[in-house]
Amino acid sequence: MISKKKDYVAEFLLASARDKISQIVIVLITIHILREYSQTTKASIDLAQRTLMRWPLNFRLRYTYSNCLNMTKSREYRLEALKQRIIGCNLELFNERNKKYAKYEDYQHIISRHFGRLENINEFLEGKKSYPSKHVQKMIQTREKSDDRLLKILQKLEEVGDLLELPQQVIKTSGFVCILDTNAISNFKVSDIL
């Protein structure tokens, strides 16, 4: 009975992905579902990357991508997660600045919510803590391993990116490595060009 309900949820998400109005919500739900299972962590990261390629200025998608990266044991991914969180925070502050009635307290709340945790994240990256935050710890500890039946349903959900026509990541091997200064992203004119 439970697997039948999960089938219905997957079918609903796939059908709803065609609706232009709810695309971001559908893709976020799908990413969260894929992230919950150890076998589909990579699929959640790939879908989150593709989503960012479509909506690069959506700070919530940056935070979701960061949370997906933190679910791995890779130090490289966890450093990338920190970078994505910083970019997301800058975008959130920029969005807040554009509101007519933004207050100083609103900025302080955003900054304290994200940068107040930097000390914990730094200790985590140095190996002094097991998890970058309590939220990530809870997600990893409650993550499940799916059986074959559920894995088939989860693999169906990976098609959401194709239904939304999200750009595919092009992997090229280059002789040059370009390192983007994330401070540049906070400059409005540079962000526009990027």
Image: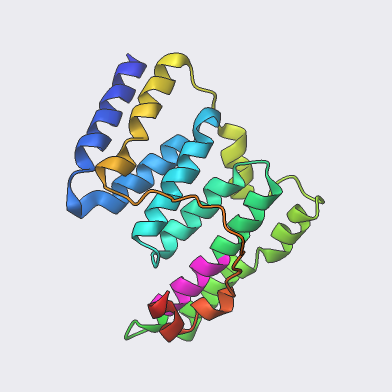
Residue 93 is covered by the magenta coloring: yes
Left or right: 124 as drawn, with respect to 103: right
Q: Main secondary structure of the magenta part?
A: helix
Residue drawn at the location 30% of the way across and 53% of the way down: 24
- The quarter of the picture where residue 141 lies is top right
The C terminus sits in image quarter = bottom left
- The quarter of the picture where residue 188 lies is bottom left
- The colour mode here is rainbow
Relative depth, front residue between 185 and 30 = 185
Left or right: 4 as drawn, with respect to 56: left
The N terminus sits in image quarter = top left
State the image coordinates of residue 176 (x, y, percent, origin top left). Answer: 61, 64
Q: Which residues are magenta?
A: 86-95
Residue drawn at the location 40% of the way across and 51% of the way down: 50
Picture mark count:
0
Q: From this viewpoint, which residue is outermost toward the front? A: 175
Residue drawn at the location 31% of the way across and 39% of the way down: 160
Whether residue 133 can be seen here:
no
Residue drawn at the location 52% of the way across and 68% of the way down: 87
- The quarter of the picture where residue 9 lies is top left
